[in-house]
Image (tube, helix red, strand yellow):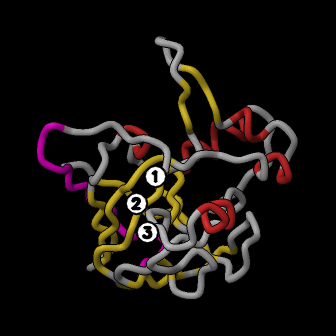
Amino acid sequence: MSFGRVTSVNKSNTHSMRKWNEQTIELLEGLGVKDDAHMGKTVKHRSRVAKDPLQPNLRQIHLIHSELHIELQEKGFRVTPGDMGENITTEGIDILNLPQNSILKIGSQSQVQITGLRNPCSQLDGIQPGLMKAVLDRNEQGELVRKAGIMGIVLCGGVISIGDKIEIELPPLPHLKLEKV
């Protein structure tokens, strides 16, 4: 069994890129982060609402690994938790390589089912020029690698705090690779 921990929790009630650091956030089952602009059963990301406002919200919660912040800082970017819109910053978990439908048990009761990879957008360049390109890479096979975090839905609500343990429950085999959502 793999474990990690929460290093930051963030939310914003507006559709700004940045989410604000909090001491705790509350997850609501089937909805997302209480008082966050992306909370809801149907899509809330403006580009997705424009295409079909009734599609299910597979992006209720956004997680980024703190190791990405370190990588970006080493490349000269000034990024801190919440700057790229994540609700939860993790440490010690290779979140980008989790299979689809993995469940993250966070804190005493919260559970988040991973739906896919965040597809980074040009709004990242509004934080700092070149940031979008910095969160994209290519693997040995030449395939695009998206490093801007993962998205999920809330299976079980609860309060999440900095320092909470994250336990990973893998789905049944065969495991499916994360794709953009």
Q: Does 143 appear above or below 79?
A: above
Residue type at numbered disc 2: Arg
Q: Position of residue 114 (x, y in %)?
A: 36, 56
Q: Residues within 10 Å of mark 3 (few under 14, many from 20)?
A: few
**Amino acid identity at mark 3:** Pro
Contact, mark 2 vs mark 1 (Cβ under 8 Å): yes
Q: Which mark is residue 161?
A: none
Q: Which residue is mark 3?
A: 56
| Magenta stretch encompasses residue 162 | yes
* 159 drawn magenta: no
Disc 2 target residue: 5
- The numbered mark, 2 or 3, whose residue comes first in the sequence reads 2
**Residue plotted at (40% across, 60% down):** 5
Give the CA distance from mark 3 to mark 1: 28 Å
Q: Which residue lies at the image location 60% right of the left edge and 80% below the top edge? A: 36
Identified at 83% across, 53% down, the residue is 127
- Position of 124 compared to 60: left or right? right
Q: Which residues are magenta?
A: 160-174
The amino acid type of the residue labelled 1 equals Glu
